[in-house]
Amino acid sequence: MFFSKNAKTMRIIEELLGDNVRTLRRSNQIVHDKKFIQYPFENDLSKLNEKDLDYCVNTFINNPYEQYKPENMLQFFLATFGEGITNLYLRPYNEKIWKFDPAFMDMQMVGRIPKPPKEDILRSAEGETVDGYIHQLYFKYPKHGGAQTFIHRINERLNEKITIFTNSEVTKLDRVGNSYSVEAGGKTFFADRIVSTMPANILASIYEPADEDIRRTASALRYNSLAILLVNVKENLVGDHFTFMVADKNVIFHRLSRLDFLGADYCIPESCTFMVEITYKKDDLIDNATDSQIIDNVVNGLKSIAFIKAADDINFINIQRFEYAYVVYDKMHRANVNAILNYFSKQGIDLLGRFGAYEYLNMDNVIEQTKSFSNRFAC
Ligand SMILES: Cc1cc2nc3c(=O)[nH]c(=O)nc-3n(C[C@H](O)[C@H](O)[C@H](O)COP(=O)(O)OP(=O)(O)OC[C@H]3O[C@@H](n4cnc5c(N)ncnc54)[C@H](O)[C@@H]3O)c2cc1C
């Protein structure tokens, strides 16, 4: 999905995608108690059962935590949204996606979320569904070819001017006087300047001059991996929505997206396809589970939230794992990342991108970061 608060960034994206693009309106739902609550949760409270609704409204209006200055993600949720919204949705969902207790995460990702006005919460409790996070309400997506189309377009442009080597893992980086040597894909390259977008922790481990201190700091950087399953089912039982968030801990996945929503090119006729996401950490139970154990769990999860009636509603299901998916903002993130950026900057090496700079960056943020870097670089 392509979106941005910044009109200039959006123009860059649109220009690259050309006429292979359509605009879609988000329809994201939270699956709670076998019902759909429109995302964000606090803007659609009237869909809750009476007990949960009273709990959320009462603890939002009479919130003892709003007096305190929050110092971690969990405290931020409690102070901003109250105990009910936190305990029914924000805490379990965030524990599930981050695989980390929000009490040990800092506020970099959430600190700028505004406190909803009391009137909005009351309107939402009385039955009015209020749209939230407006900058992501509409998004662009290629009509065909998927998000990768965007990368292909950049490649085509760059290939006119530079040579791009792919499938060439960088395995060693060293200093040679004022230059650098890079071993990648069985070849050695020499460079005057290095800009790295590979994960900063890997960079520290392959950078020969790096000392033990910086390697230890880099290995403390936390991240989540992701298993993505493509599940094609016989029938759409969930309506014309796109993304579904599931906070229930008995269900292995935290999010599903119905790919048919993206347009005709993403549909298989007379069926419905979901992309199912499961985060995990190195050596946790999901990392150590076999693909077929994960698949069995996903099928059970789909049944329990009524996205399928029975296992034989599934036409096909496959799984892929991606090691680097999410930067985890644990309480040490800022100090560790600053130390690493500082170290590599002194080595004359620039770190960019989501895992290069080790920040939760979406594509629009990466475009902006890269543009700002190239402007400085050109000076
Ligand atoms: C599940 C998920 C959904 C997302 N959805 C969206 C979305 O809808 N919209 C959006 O804007 N953003 C989305 N993002 C974020 C988006 O994917 C990132 O912002 C973007 O990919 C970051 O680009 P990058 O170039 O920094 O890093 P990457 O795209 O991760 O590229 C880094 C590259 O470095 C390579 N690499 C690693 N190690 C080495 C090595 N040793 N040698 C050589 N190469 C190496 C990797 O193979 C990779 O190709 C999503 C991310 C995830 C995980």
Image (tube, helix red, strand yellow):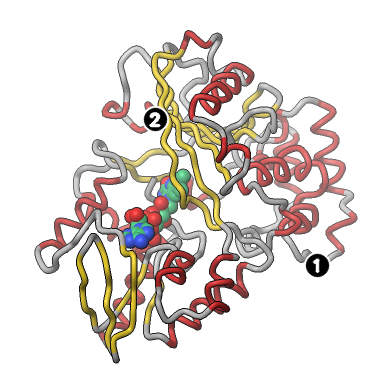
Disc on res. 50: none
In the image, is residue 375 above or below residue 203? Answer: below
The quadrant holding residue 377 is: bottom left
Q: Image point 37% across, 49% down: which residue?
A: 2
Image side of residue 196 versus residue 257, left or right: left
In this rendering, would 331 be left or right of 142?
Answer: right
What residue is shown with label 2?
Answer: 259
Identify the residue position indicated by label 1 in the image.
Answer: 69
Q: Position of residue 10 (x, y in %)?
A: 34, 57
Q: Is residue 363 visible?
A: no
Tell whether 278 sits left or right of 270. Answer: right
Name the residue located 51 percent from the left edge and 64 percent from the top edge: 359
Find numbered disc 1 in the image and state the secondary structure of the residue it sits on: loop
Q: Within the displayed image, which quadrant is ligand 1 positioned in?
A: bottom left
Q: Residue furthest left?
A: 160
Q: Residue 12, percent across and down?
A: 28, 60
Residue 151 vs residue 250, the one in the foreground: 250
Image quarter of residue 125? top right
Say which quadrant the N terminus sits in. Answer: top left
Q: Residue at x 57, y 38 (%)?
A: 288
Type of the residue with mark 2? Leu
The residue at the far bottom in this view is 177
**The C terminus, quarter of image:** bottom left
- Disc 1 marks a residue whose amino acid type is Lys
